[in-house]
Structure formats: structure tokens, C-alpha cells
Amino acid sequence: MKLRGRKLTATLSFVAGTGFILFGYDQGVMSALLTANQFEKVFPQVVVSDQHPDHATLQSFLVAIYEIGCLSGALINLVLGDRFGRKRTIALGCFIMTIGAIIQAASYSYAQIIVARIITGVGNGLNTSTVPAYHAECSPPHQRGSLIMIEGSLITLGIMISYWIDFALFWASGSSAQWRVPIALQILFALVVVFALSILPESPRWLMKAGRPAEALAVISALEDKPHTDSTVRTTFHAIKEAVALEGSNIDTSSSSEKASLSELFTGGRTQNFRRVALGVIIQCFQQASHPLLLGDNITGINLITYYATILFERLGINDVKSRILAACNGTEYFLASLVAIFLIDRVGRRKLMIFGGVGQCLTMVLLAVLGSINNSAADIVSAVLLFVFNSFFAIGWLGMTWLYPAEIVGLRMRGPANALSTASNWTFNFLVVMITGPAFQNISWKTYIVFAALNAFIIPIVYFFFPETAGRSLEDMDVVFALAYLENVSPVTVSLRKDVPPAGSPEAERILGLQVGSISNSDEVLPKEAEGTKS
């Protein structure tokens, strides 16, 4: 394996990041295009006017149908994810996105671009339900949070790039290149991801689950940049074997490739599958429900800002050029704010950042509602500033968090299906928010902000009482946390905050997990020669 240690980790982060740049770019590119004159000329159905008020629904549908494609891709991953592995699933997603982008860029009718956006969404759904798990499974515990939060930052980088490209091509008002070129450029990001994947290893967790322990050991050795006989490498290897054994797979038999049954998602006991999957689904729902204004997220209100940023600024009485500049600056500030979370996530922890974001988002929505009720030029200016403030709170507390947390909280056997379901939750609520935002502002105006303020307020106590802390623990350590909470009949949140939880792979952890003591930690089923052969 040519890439090892930091070089391998950096390349993995580059691939995951580029995949999320593609995700952000594909979301952001539609914002300014909705008001581009060449786009409106080809697709008059998106032009909302007094003569055609019903076009608001068609406009929202064009934006939101992408989420249906993403939802479909995430659900397809329930079937394909564990069968194909992480790398091949991501490559398939990029291929499908490329086909969708080509059809979008070549569209000449409303029906054609609707179909194309569904196809593009399927590819993105496959990617967004796989990339975080792949990245998490290949990241060291003490850096996992910051590495995966980079993905969230790069979503906003993709959004920022799309805004500035849209602004640059705004001046090409006499050519359809004004909107076709921005859409086609996403193909470049997809090709970069596919090429980079060719030099990366498969996830060691998936390899172990698939009954290929020698390859898994070689990958762990490369990630740690240590020989396969090193105690750290062996401990990580045994911890993964422990997770596989706990969840009913035997790596030495043909049953190792047995697929997880969806019915297992609803089980409890030591594994606490249902609780853990529910947390992954709920956090993705919360992200979307908390942002009606912003570009790419849902219940919080962020999707409204992302998909409709240019339109929002125009509604504040700002002209075409200035509204595009403000939208691009908004995307730039969004990206810069997201960088803060990278440095805080492993120091502060997941729970505190989520609560901080929820409080800030709630207060911002309340202020937007108050200013909306006043409705004068001064209030409009402050409202425009508050859009930037909301972006900042969301970027720090929730942007990357909802891609990190579901990959951390779920056990190995359920990780593929659980990430597919949590991502499906994201896209389902994304679709709902994008669809209702236009009609909501048209019918209840500034009162829409009150709805999202209430949703953000609701999030805060839910996170405090039900979301365990995962910072500083390996993915397999979380199995021990949930098993110990089950045995002691206490909340996993309480156990996750304790310092005395034994690490995965230790004899104490085996007792807690209900395994025969020494069956994993004292075993040595992968011979050095076999591991060395795979490594070479």
C-alpha cells in the first residue's frame, strides 16, 4: 500500500471533502439560476408573477425534486451499500451524478430538467449516505470529529463557489451558457472523486465485516503508519473484531458476508440498535427543520437561505446585481464560519456545539420575525445582516455535525443501513422544507420565522437529554457505552460522560458486551505472513 499514515489520511479527507464540495455546489448552483433571465426564458414555469402566482409551486418543485432523487439514492443504499462496499458505492454515485448533470445542462424543457435533477439527486443520495461512514471508519478517534467537520465546511465551499460562478456568468445574459455552464461544472468534481478513489483502500471495518481480516489489518497498519504487529494496530484490529462478533457475524465463516436484516434496526438489548438508529435519523431531521432560510439544511431553516438566497435579498428591495453579490458574500461567510467548528469539535464535544447552534438559531429566527413585522428599510437591512448571523450559528453547531454523528453513534453491522436511513431523513425533510417555504412566505410572510424559531427551541432539550457524547471515543467504544448503559439501566448520555468506561478490545469491554472473555483480545487469527502479503 503506497499511501500510509498522514498522506493516506489526507487523501481520504480530500476525497470525502471533494464529494461534499460536489454536494454543496449542486445545491447552491440553483439559487441564482432561478432569477437568471436565460434560465427563465427556457423555463418560464419558474417565473412567479401576479399573472402566474401558481408558478411559485412549480418553482419550489424544481428545487425540491432534487431532494426526492437524493432520498431515493439513500434508500437504494440500504440494498447496495454493504454489498458494494464504501468505495464502489461512492464511485457509482459520482457516475450517476455525472449523467444527471449532463442531462440538466442539455435541458430544453421543464420536464427534462425535472427528470435530470432526480437522476443527479440519486447519485448524491448514494454519496451522502456513504462518504461520512467511509471517512469515519478510516479516521483516528482523536481526529475523527475535526476531519469529518471538514466535510461540512467543504459543503459551504461548494455553495460559495456556485454563487460566485453564478455571479460571474450573470453578465452572459445573451447566452444560455449563463446557466448551462454552472450546472455542467459539477461534472469536474465528480471525476476528481472517482480518480482519487482508485488509489485509496477500502474501509477496514467493511473489510472485516466482509470476511477479509488480513486486508483489514493491512489497512489499519497503513492508516496508523505502524507495522501490523504494533500493539496499537492490534488493539484497533481486535476492537473491530469484537464489534463484528457482538453483532452476530463470524469473520472466519461464510456467514461473515451475511447482510444485516432491516428488522435488526428495531432491536434493543446490549446493542441498542433502535435507539442508536433513531438518534441518527432524528439529528438529520433536526438539521433540516431548524433552518428555513439557508441553503442546504432543513428544519432549522438553512435550506431556505441556500436555495433561495438571491430571491430573499431581492425581496428585501435589493437589485439583481447587488442581491447576487450579497448571496455570494453570504456563501463566503458561511464557509468561513464553518471553519470554526473544525477546531472546536474535538475540544468542546458534539453536545455543546449542537446546543450552542440551536440557541443561536432560535434567537436569530425570533429577531427575524420581529423585524419582518416592522417592515421598513432599516428593518430590511438588519434582516439581511441576520441572514449572515444565522449562517454562522448553523455552520458552527449543525452543518457538519449531522454527517458526523450518525456515522459515530451506530454499530458496525447497522452502520450502512442506518446511514442510509438517516440520510433519507435528511432529504425527506429537505424536500418538505423547500416545498413549503415559498408558499409559506407567500401566505403568512414573516410568521414563517416563528415556526422555525419554535423548532429550534425544541431541539435544545432533546439534545441535552437524549444525545450521548462521542468525542474522544473510537467507533467501537460506543458499543461499550450503550451496552454498559443497558446493563446498568441508566441513560447512555450519563455513561458517555463518564471517564471509567473500558476501551473496546479490552477484557473488561468483552464482559460488558457479553462476549467470552479472551475470545477476541487473546486471539490471533490473522497470521503475520498473511497480513504482510496483503500489505505488499
Image (tube, helix red, strand yellow):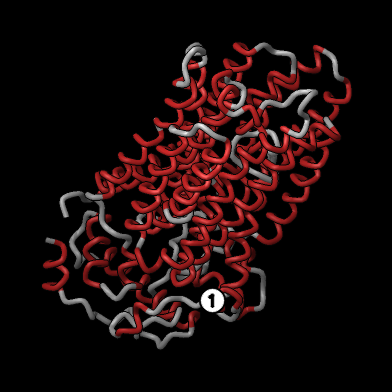
The residue closer to the viewer here, 334 or 376, is 376
Q: Residue at x 74, y 35 (%)?
A: 438
Rendered-image quadrant of the C terminus: bottom left
The residue that appears at 79% across and 37% down in the rendered structure is: 440
Q: Residues within 10 Å of mark 1 (few under 14, many from 20)?
A: many
Q: Which residue occupies the foreground of this view, 101 or 367?
A: 101
| Residue 40 percent coordinates (x, y) | 60, 23
**Residue 517 visible from this viewpoint:** yes
Count all numbered tags in the image, as a single digit.
1
Which quarter of the picture shows residue 223? bottom left
For this view, does 428 lie left or right of residue 411?
Answer: right
Task: In the rendered view, tell whether residue 163 sits above or below residue 402.
Answer: above
| Image coordinates for residue 249, horizontal then vertical, percent | 39, 81
Residue 217 against residue 523 in the figure, above or below: above
Looking at the image, can residue 483 be seen?
no
Picture coordinates of residue 120, whole percent (x, y): 47, 45
Residue at position x 40%, y 67% from top? 82
Q: Using the image as rendered, state which of residue 531 and residue 313 is in the foreground.
A: 313
Q: Which residue is more in the foreground, 106 or 328?
A: 106
- With 374 as the anchor, is 205 left or right in this view? left
Which residue matches tag 1?
271
- Which quadrant of the figure contains the N terminus? bottom left
Q: Is residue 451 left or right of residue 111?
A: right
Q: Residue at x 52, y 42 (%)?
A: 117
- Mark 1: secondary structure: loop
